[in-house]
Amino acid sequence: MKENEIELKIQALVDGELTESEAEQMRECMDNDVRLQILYAQLIQTKDLISKYEMPRVLPESGDFYWAKIAQEIRTGEPTNQGSNNSLVIKWLFHRLAPLLGIATIVLLITLQQPSVPDLAIELESDHELELLSDEIDVMTFNSVDDSMSIVWLEYSMDIQRDYMELWLD
Amino acid sequence: MREVPDYSTVDEPRLVDGAKSGDMQSFEELVSRYRDRVYARAYSIMRNEDLAVDLSQNAWVKAWQRLAQFHGDASFATWLNRIVTNLCLDELRRQKRLRTDSIEEIEEATGPVENRMEIQDVDPIAKLNQKELRERIDDAMDKLSDSHRTVLVLYEYEQLEYKEIADQMDTSVGTVMSRLFYARKKLAALLGEALKREGLIE
Amino acid sequence: MQILSKYRLGKFSLFIAILLFVGSGIASDKANSIEIRAALVVGASKEKKGAKKLSESIRKRLAKVFKWRNYYRLSDKQLSIPVDKTKTAKLSKKASIKVSNRKNGRVSVSLFSGGKELIQKSQTLRIGSYMVLAGESTGDSAWFIVISKSN
């Protein structure tokens, strides 16, 4: 066995990845080699250090804001929870209400044919309304009721970020 | 009037069942219980706060979409960590950060790493308190290449086996073993260097 | 004489009535005006010596949500806006906002960069509550426009 193969086997022994017979063979190898015994001890020590002392980390932003972004993503995402009761109810309703929906669509189309300014308003809550006027920008919205604060976070690509930096902070 | 349950007192299996049936509040409670943990895993691989936040959030969205596939074989936290780990690996691949540096590749392929690297006895760490020790280990993790650090994270933190890591990283078990070996030696060496600089060892 | 005094009295009454009418208009305009404060703020991870710090109450609220710990006020504008009227505040060389008073505390705020309108946010703004428009900047910092109502 090559030297580096032996070292990797020693590591596998430390990690408990060897079969019992392979482990026995490696223990025999170590019995006659002080250098391998040192390596074995060092690997155990390093393994211990890494696994026991992982740096604890907390989110760098508030939990509410973090959740708001997830919830928004979920709501704007594809239909989820395959086969859930909700989707069955929606399907049932859709079948029953299809004719009504058809009529409603026609009424809506007639209404939309009236000359009017395109309405891009997005209803956030009953009171909040947001209108996006640039297609280079996406927004995240978040209402912190505790802090009486509503936040609109503008998201734009890194390419235009430099421009915005100049725009805002000069 | 229907009583609103106090989700913080609801046990995890009930929350998972609630989320599976489309209850966002149950899912929100799961997020609040595990968000730091999922973020920490993403950070440990990506080493970038913003990316870690984004990827951990994507992991939650994916988790919501795949809840039907969660059967409780592993714990919910383990299942989540697998999702975020996979997203991080995809991101590293996308950024081509999983390619091993050529020097490291040569070292891995040409025999014992210790020929080129001083073996460090890390015993003097006893002089450091837990917080200081964590910081030094974290600094050392920061200096590892992405592929070496990822193997370490998957093995030591995620407790995956060699074969599972090889599958996740699209590589061979031999490469995983060799990367893990190199990563541990390098980490010990970096830690030793830091301790030397601080006069904790000669 | 009587006729004259009657006439004078009538004229005087008319004058008073006009005065009262105009006055009540002004008073009601004043009563329906809202006082809006808008501040352009930068959030940074590192401390910036010499920069104007944001008031602690707002700083705390922002720091609770965002990762940045230091917040500095770059500019500050106060607007008095009568009902159904719009006023503009220039906050930096290119950043400006237009605020409209939509009655009953409801305001619409349009955000412009270099003359281009980016978004418009409408909501009821109560005393002590804040509307924050924000975005990322380079160098691990972010800009915030903090809008509040002071009457």
Image (cartoon, coloured by chain):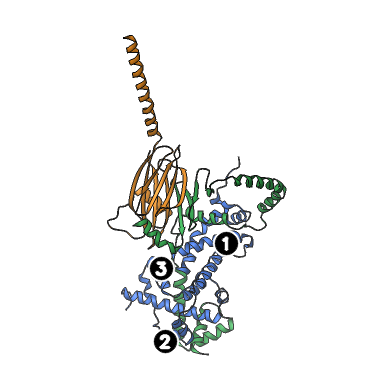
- Give the CA distance from mark 2 to mark 3: 28 Å
Q: Residues within 10 Å of mark 3 (few under 14, many from 20)?
A: some
Earlier sequence position, callout 2 versus callout 3: 2
Disc 2 designates what residue?
A: B115
Disc 3 designates what residue?
A: B134
Disc 1 designates what residue?
A: B62
> In the rendering, what colour is chain C?
orange
Q: Percent x, y for residue A74?
A: 57, 56
Asked whether the residues under marks 2 and 3 belong to the same chain, the reply is yes
Chain under label 3? B
Report the amino acid beneath label 3. Answer: Arg
Q: Percent x, y for residue A115?
A: 57, 45
Q: Residues within 10 Å of mark 2 (few under 14, many from 20)?
A: few
Q: Percent x, y for residue A89?
A: 68, 50
Q: Is residue C37 left or right of residue B152?
A: left
- Give the CA distance from mark 1 to mark 2: 45 Å
> In the rendering, what colour is chain A?
green
